[in-house]
Amino acid sequence: MKYRPMGATGLLVSELALGAMIFGERTQRSTPVDEAERMVARFLEVGGNHIDTANVYGGGRSEEIVGKAIQGKRDQVVLATKVRFAMGQGPNDAGLSRYHIVRSVEDSLRRLQTDTIDLLYMHGWDPLTPLEESLRAFDDLVASGKVHYIGVSNFKAWQLMKALGLSDAHGWARFVAAQYQYSLVVRDIEQEFLDLCESEGIGITPWGPLGGGFLSGKYRRDKPPEAPSEGRLAVTPDEYEEAWTKRSTEQNWKILDRMDEVIAGHPGSTHSQVALAWLMTRPAVVSVIMGVRTMEQLEDNLAAVDLELTKEEVEQIDEVSSIAMTYPYRVIQSTRS
């Protein structure tokens, strides 16, 4: 396992992160508690140190499972969690108000059985709360020692840049990490966020690197997945990001075909490993979040750190998975000297 600095900081995180989103979910496809604990132990054993969760995952149960699993190993972990979405039925049980942020962090610390969160994300934009209020609350948490670093997720580019401007103007703690969906089948953030994050010293921590399982290679053009046995795509409603209707496109099938060619040149490798290895070559990407459900999936994903794609292979995958350039990027590209 290799380590990379998180943005413009001295914090070193493993190039693969263990995502705990489905730990504690009350569904047939959630990870049982005992297996989740074994997965955390295995991840730390091979040198992984970045574990990502959120207060809303499993209604807080994910944080509880992670907190129990890292007892006695807390100093080996860069622990990330998030705040924004509803954690109760009350009018102040959601959002990015100081009230909700501070209460949520106290609850997360209790569930995680720790006194410090290493990386706290704003999990999404809050249109009701002044951004200054949210940023000041985050800065106070850093000053108090309850949080070490702060990050952002699911903001638009202008919202992220506005936040950075406010932080710089007031001398508040600055975002050092950005968590966005990013994979060979979802490259939308490349139009703004790669340049933005690279220029502003923010490390990108992609989620959904396998496109909801589509890039695992287990699906076929002529056979839609059957629920509930054939993965997340089989049970995800069409309106959500990781839905079969969004994945089963001709371009995406061509991506898998190209991945087959790459795998042929690396005997023993898998589609998942190619997808992860490609992401680790992208600008500003620091630590790719693995959304694994089983120990078998974890072992497969971990092997991606040993897969070295050639420059030609990366370029071939880039070409087949590229997204259409839209305005004003077409004009910028055509006039670039």
Image (tube, rainbow, N blue to C red):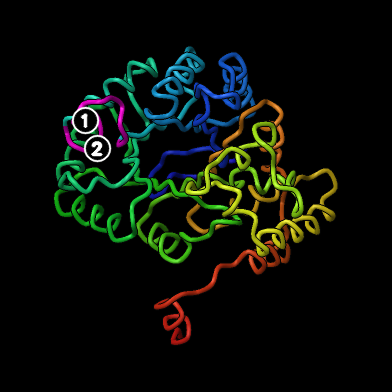
Q: Where is residue 242 shown, x and y percent of the image?
A: 54, 46
- Indicate left or right for 207 with 261 as reference: left
Q: Amino acid at mark 2?
A: Gly
Residue range of the region highlighted in magenta in the rendering = 84-98
Looking at the image, which residue is at 71% across and 43% down? 306
Looking at the image, which residue is at 33% across and 57% down? 156
Q: Amino acid at mark 1?
A: His
Circles 2, 1 touching at the beta carbon (< 8 Å) = yes
Instruction: Give the number of marks.
Output: 2
Quarter holding residue 234: top right
Is residue 227 found inside the magenta-colored segment of the image? no
Which element type, helix, strand or loop, lies under badge 1? Answer: helix
Q: Which residue is mark 2?
A: 95
State which quarter of the image contains the N terminus: top right
- Indicate left or right for 147 with 183 as reference: left
Q: Earlier in the sequence, mark 2 or mark 1?
A: 2
Q: Which mark is residue 100?
A: 1
Above or below, 80 against 26 in this view is: below
Q: Where is residue 130 shown, x and y percent of the image?
A: 15, 47
Q: Residues within 10 Å of mark 1 (few under 14, many from 20)?
A: many
Looking at the image, which residue is at 16% across and 30% down? 99
